[in-house]
Image (cartoon, helix red, strand yellow):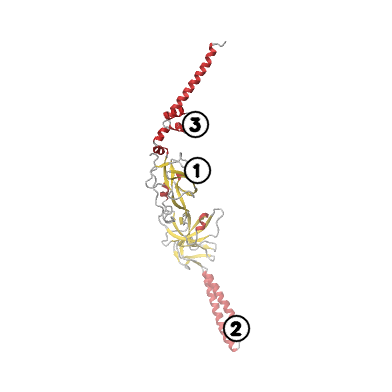
Amino acid sequence: MISPIMAKEPMAFIRQIFAALFVVCALALVSLWAFETPGRALLAYRDSLPSPLVSLVEAVSRGSETKISATPQRSRQNQATLVVTDIVRPDVTRDRLRTIGTGQAQRSVAIYPDATGLVQEINVRSGDAVEQGQVLATLRNSNETVAVQRARIALEAAQEQATRYQSLLRTGAVTTVQNDEVRRAVEAAALDLQSAEIALEDRNITAPISGRIGLVTLEPGALVSNQTLVATLDDRSQLKVVVEIPEAFVPQIALDHAVTAIPTTRTGKQYSGQISALDNRVDAASRTLRAEATVDNVADDLRPGMSFTVDIGFPGQQYLSVDALAVQWERSGPYVWVVSDGAVRKASVNIIERSVNRVLVSSTELAAGDAVVTEGLQQLREGAPVRQQNPAALPALPDEVPTVDRSPAASGDRAFLAQGDVPGQTRSATP
């Protein structure tokens, strides 16, 4: 016989089950009433649901199918995702190279004496402008002067003897052989005089080129040799600016290519020049090509050894520019959402270059003037309807490809490109 206590236990368990079912149903009704998504999800399977359940969901749900069907146009607008767009613009890259260069004199010479001796006289001061062949300093030359005089006397004596022998040869008093020996003696005496004059000339330290003399550290009486540096002489009427050209720009660089050199002292002055020399190979370590650009220094305000910012323009390569916020990533690579006829489609892109807020891309699925989504990306899917908040007006595309002289990047106005703002576009997230 079953005791009363054991009979009550199944009844209590059944009551607990009914209580739990009641709580679950109540929560389901509350969620259907409070949120639109659950009811809409259930109504999507209305054909497989019992009619009483469909009626109950339609009565309770806030987003019922009855309400949706009553206002179809308004429903589609509510379902369209609100997005902010930006316009795809044409731009160029690798259109300008800015690098650091070092100035060198057009010609530079280190001056050393040709002989050893004591300094007798210094004829220039540090920084003087000198002409080619000008005597800068003189070494003591007494012995060399005497040697020149002795050689000159010997030459005169030999010439007189040759004249006498020439007369005697006509009378037959001397032989032809004797006359030839005297003539050779004259030639030897002339060479001795020339050698003595060279030795005397070597006592003068002269300027091999025209230019500006550097610091002169010699003093009269100092002993110098052919290893003693007297001074440096620079021809700085033009300056050579040595730069390293990256390998990517090597195919576009050539002789006479225009450059602009700006001293890093920020004097505000710019100096125009052109490429005057190119190395014959790319350095394997730095992957750069050594080049020299020549700039005029008529005002003589540039010095060898100065550093310059060298700006070199190129035709560049044309790509598309999009806002950096528009670029999204997936396993297959980067892409952007393109707005077309009120819906979005995915366009794959290849990233070429990044700037502050813009990205240069290439793509066969994207064109200049397309509108790409920059905000509201989280709820987008292929073909989803969208509404543009203050849609950006498509700008008039240029009739021709931007060039290095006319593109915003070439003119230094990359700040304009970086902002990514189009007239009439609002970047606010609220409607």
The residue where tag 1 is placed is: 329
Q: Amino acid at mark 3?
A: Ser
Mark toward the start of the polypeptide (1 vs 2): 2
The residue where tag 3 is placed is: 48
Mark toward the start of the polypeptide (3 vs 1): 3
User: Of helix, strand and loop, which one carries label 3?
Assistant: helix
Give the position of the N terminus as an image quadrant. top right
Task: Locate residue 174: give its quadrant.
Answer: bottom right
Mark toward the start of the polypeptide (3 vs 2): 3
Q: Nearer the viewer, mark 3 or mark 2?
A: 3
Left or right for 39, reference 177:
left
Residue 246 in percent (x, y) is at: 51, 54
User: Circle 2: is it few (<14), some (14-19), or many (20+) Cα within 10 Å?
Assistant: many
The residue where tag 2 is placed is: 179
Judge whether residue 216 can be spotted in this image: no
Left or right for 222, reference 67:
right
User: Of helix, strand and loop, which one carries label 1?
Assistant: strand
Q: Nearer the viewer, mark 3 or mark 1?
A: 3
Q: Nearer the viewer, residue 423 or 303?
A: 423
User: Of helix, strand and loop, which one carries label 2?
Assistant: helix
Give the position of the C terminus as an image quadrant. top left
Q: Residue furthest bottom?
A: 171
Q: Nearer the viewer, residue 29 or 275?
A: 29
Residue 391 in percent (x, y) is at: 39, 45
Task: Locate residue 192: give its quadrant.
Answer: bottom right
User: Circle 3: is it few (<14), some (14-19), or many (20+) Cα within 10 Å?
Assistant: few
Answer whether labels 3 and 1 touch (C-beta < 8 Å).
no
Q: Amino acid at mark 1?
A: Trp
